[in-house]
Amino acid sequence: MGISLSIEDPVDVELGYTMRDLPPRAGHTFPGRETPLIDREPDGSARPHTPGTPTFMRAGGRNLLGSEPELLRRCQLSSTSSLESPLSPSQSKSPWSRFDPYDSIEDQDKEYVGFATLPNQVHRKSVKKGFAFTLMVAGESGLGKSTLINSLFLTDLYKDRKMLNAEERITQTVEMTKHTIGIEEKGVKLKLTIVDTPGFGDAVNNTESWRSVVDYIDQQFEQYFRDESGLNRKNIQDNRVHCCLYFISPYGHGLRPVDVEFMKALHEKVNIVPVLAKADCLTPRELTRKKIKIREEIETFGIKIYQFPECDSDEDEEFRLQEQELKDSIPFAVVGSNILVESKGRRFRGRMYPWGVVEVENPAHSDFLKLRNMLVRTHMQDLKDVTRETHYENYRAQCIQDMTRMVVRERKRSLCSQLRESTSDLPLVPVDSETERLIWEKDEEVRKFNKHGKS
Ligand code: GDP
């Protein structure tokens, strides 16, 4: 299978810069965040990046490292009182000590070993290393996959795309394409890989169109398994697919057979997140009904889509509500656009129609923001964890089982041929009790080996 790398050199896209073109509307904040994406100082000026800029955001706007005014307060406090607290292990001059959990006034008179700084060390290491995420998009062509990806990541990944005509598409097989971009936001680097499946669902007979996608996912697992079992395990490239956005047509009556087939073929291998494409084609009533129908069908057909993790018992009410809202939004009804529309003095990504304008980022118009927040802000790490702990683990266990079976079969075969050789040395006489004993002994050896090998 040919994988074409359309973008050879990763392109740096400064998300913060692009976001400046798209300020959130007055009174419209991103769920889980009350401030625009760019970092601003209290006086309104853009704050230069510091290596320790908090990035661990969770839904509910909570920051694992504390709110910014709180951090500023801590910095000021630590600079004025550092000499009075010789016992605090947080006296380093490192820029990271700004987030030192010991740098608070109430901690200054206590004795500490210092392991409360461990999260900071992990934070620093991961920021240095950077992050990688692989997102697959699948669904019939024309459903707005490329438009949505460009809108989600504020980029233009598909400028070199070649569109096939109807005749070419009749015989077209599903082909996997991969685009990689480097995105940097507030000093945090993300290597984002988008895997597309052009041709999916476009042929006259689509019964097996999921096969190339399954093969692709398995190949990435296989490559990772090989690398992980090899000698140089330090710089393994992780190309495993962490999430698959599956686009469902807004025009059908719920799921089509090809949707069911595809999701069932993939649900044990990848985190499937269903999206209802081109949501602006549906009235609010139609949209609600379609969502309910699709959720029911997903249940009826036993399709295991990505499950949002259950909230911990110590989570606050706001977080719980946001998680529930996410669950109820499935399939995410999305609208994409590559065009900046200007209306009433504001510029935003939208779709302009004779009867009005659809705003991509308006929660009243689509679930676009919910999807982006889920993918990037709140669940990216969980999607990676589930890929590693569940999907890849299943693949790995299956591989090890197959390999063990192969080794046992091979040993058995060689023992049999040894037996054949040893018995051929004996004079050709009718099988007597001694030969029978010998054969029995060899068979017993094989049996024992099998039993041992399996246990
Ligand atoms: P792909 O083949 O699935 O990648 O689809 P494209 O992104 O190329 O979009 C196909 C057509 O649908 C283009 O004309 C887009 O402008 C249009 N389109 C994309 N997203 C939306 C949407 O959310 N709503 C509507 N109404 N049209 C869309």
Image (cartoon, rainbow, N blue to C red):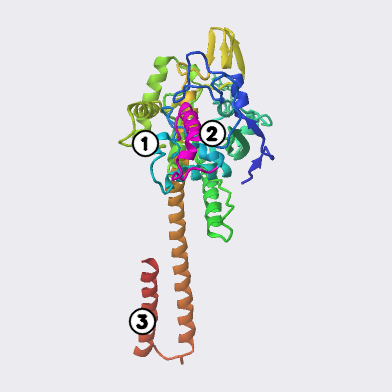
Hey, which quadrant is residue 437 in on the image? bottom left
First-in-chain label (3 vs 2): 2
User: In the displayed structure, would residue 99 be above or below residue 43?
Assistant: below
Magenta stretch encompasses residue 83: yes
Q: Which residue is the site of mark 1?
A: 301
Query: In the rendering, which numbered label is found on residue 396?
Result: none
Q: Residues within 10 Å of mark 3 (few under 14, many from 20)?
A: few
Callout 1, which amino acid? Answer: Phe
Alpha carbon of mark 3 to alpha carbon of mark 1: how far? 51 Å
Magenta residue span: 65-92
| Tag 3 secondary structure | helix
**Residue 356 can be seen in this image:** yes
User: In the displayed structure, would residue 343 be above or below residue 374?
Assistant: above
Callout 3, which amino acid? Answer: Trp
Query: In the rendering, which numbered label is found on residue 53?
Result: 2
Nearest to the observer: residue 173 or residue 447: 447
Q: Residues within 10 Å of mark 1 (few under 14, many from 20)?
A: few
| Tag 2 secondary structure | loop
Query: In the rendering, which numbered label is found on residue 440?
Result: 3
**Residue 214, position in %: x, y?**
51, 44
First-in-chain label (2 vs 1): 2
Q: Are marks 3 and 2 in contact (CB under 8 Å)?
A: no
First-in-chain label (3 vs 1): 1
Alpha carbon of mark 3 to alpha carbon of mark 2: how far? 72 Å
**Residue 417, position in %: x, y?**
48, 78
Nearest to the observer: residue 393 or residue 252: 393
The answer to whether the beta carbon of the residue marked 3 is less than 8 Å from any atom of ligand 1 is no
Counting the numbered discs, the total is: 3
Magenta stretch encompasses residue 413: no
| Tag 1 secondary structure | loop
